[in-house]
């Protein structure tokens, strides 16, 4: 297996622009926003309920996208009823409600003439928002997502790519202004889909920098390799257990034959044979160690593995002195 580079996380195939789930969500939300726009025009009070529903859908799905990508998935999460109903998926609503509360503080400061404080709050909030969202998505803990020290550490851990998040946020604010001034279903759709792309971007950066950020991504290459390795070790241990049963009943030749039959099916036979030798020496059976070691030396020499052959020869010489 080739070593994995952190930058590879940013070079996975891009999300399908026409993936059904985000397109459908963006379309539905855009339609609902158009309904809200019309409701406000005719002064319909119940339109507030539609706006709450829009907020509920978008906030929960946004956090779900960040988490889904940060854990190593290279596709979009499927929007489902669980996104709205499951308790853990309400993190988006709660978090963005807190963001709205902070926005309320901003407007209050401006109302009371504290423009400098308001601008500082706005600038700091916008600069920290992507890092705060990333923390919430991977930890599901609000106190971490709102801790300034942890947010700054996360932003630093995301490296220069964090600037992409800030640029994406700026683009969304521009689209928000255009959608407000021009209205229309198309502009709302573009705005919502850009918001979902921003979630994907944040999750992708977290995934690419997972080693620095300490994020466990079960679908990352190294996590899949570790899982495959654990499964291989489990299989090999079962083989050794059966072989050891043959050996303890006096059938040492059968034990070696059983091990050889498995090794013939292993993709990395050199590594598998060396691993088996390291385990066989624990049996404390000189005859089996020497017999297996002799076969392994011949195999290494035939396949040009001189260093491995020399190492096995030293092991065999050590065990030969014990006869």
Image: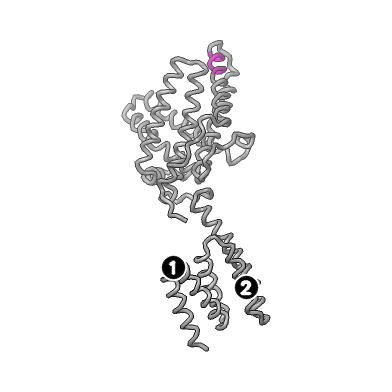
Q: Estimate the spatial distance between the alpha carbons at disc 1 and disc 2, rounded to whole Å.
A: 24 Å
- Residue at the far front: name it: 302
Principal SS element in the magenta part?
Answer: helix
Which is more toward the observer, 322 or 186? 322
- Relative to 280, 181 lies left or right: left
Among numbered discs 1 and 2, the one appearing first in the sequence: 2
Mark 1 — residue?
304
Choose top left, top right, bottom left or bottom right for residue 227.
Answer: bottom right
Q: Residues within 10 Å of mark 1 (few under 14, many from 20)?
A: few
Residue 186 position (above or below residue 232):
above
Please give the name of the residue rendered at 42% of the width and 40% of the height, measured from the top-left corner: 131
Mark 2 — residue?
257
- Residue at the far top: name it: 42
Choose top left, top right, bottom left or bottom right for residue 314.
Answer: bottom left
| Span of residues in magenta | 34-40
Which is more toward the observer, 132 or 253? 253
């Amino acid at each position: 297996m080739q070593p994995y580079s952190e930058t590879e996380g940013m070079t996975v195939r891009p999300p399908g622009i026409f993936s059904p789930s985000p397109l459908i969500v963006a379309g539905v939300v855009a339609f609902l926003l158009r309904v809200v726009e019309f409701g406000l025009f005719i002064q319909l009070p119940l339109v507030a309920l539609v706006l709450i529903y829009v907020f509920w859908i978008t906030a929960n799905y946004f956090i779900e996208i960040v988490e889904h990508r940060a854990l190593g998935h290279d596709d979009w999460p499927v929007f489902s009823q669980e996104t709205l109903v499951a308790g853990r998926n309400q993190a988006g609503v709660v978090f963005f409600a807190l963001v709205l509360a902070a926005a309320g503080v901003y407007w209050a400061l401006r109302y009371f003439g504290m423009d400098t404080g308001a601008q500082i709050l706005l600038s700091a909030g916008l600069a920290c928002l992507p890092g705060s969202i990333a923390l919430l998505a991977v930890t599901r803990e609000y106190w971490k997502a709102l801790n300034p020290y942890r947010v700054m550490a996360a932003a630093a851990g995301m490296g220069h790519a964090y600037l992409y998040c800030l640029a994406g946020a700026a683009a969304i604010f521009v689209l928000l202004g255009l959608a407000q001034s021009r209205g229309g279903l198309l502009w709302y759709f573009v705005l919502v889909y850009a918001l979902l792309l921003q979630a994907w971007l944040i999750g992708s950066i977290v995934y690419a920098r997972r080693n620095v950020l300490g994020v466990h991504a079960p679908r990352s290459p190294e996590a899949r390799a570790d899982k495959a390795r654990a499964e291989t070790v489990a299989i090999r241990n079962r083989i050794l257990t059966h072989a050891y049963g043959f050996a303890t009943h006096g059938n040492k030749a059968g034990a070696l034959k059983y091990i050889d039959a498995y090794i013939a099916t292993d993709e990395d036979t050199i590594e598998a044979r060396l691993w088996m030798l390291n385990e066989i020496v624990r049996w404390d059976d000189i005859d089996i160690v020497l017999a297996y070691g002799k076969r392994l030396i011949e195999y290494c020499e035939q396949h040009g593995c001189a260093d491995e052959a020399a190492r096995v020869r030293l092991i065999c010489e050590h065990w030969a002195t014990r006869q």
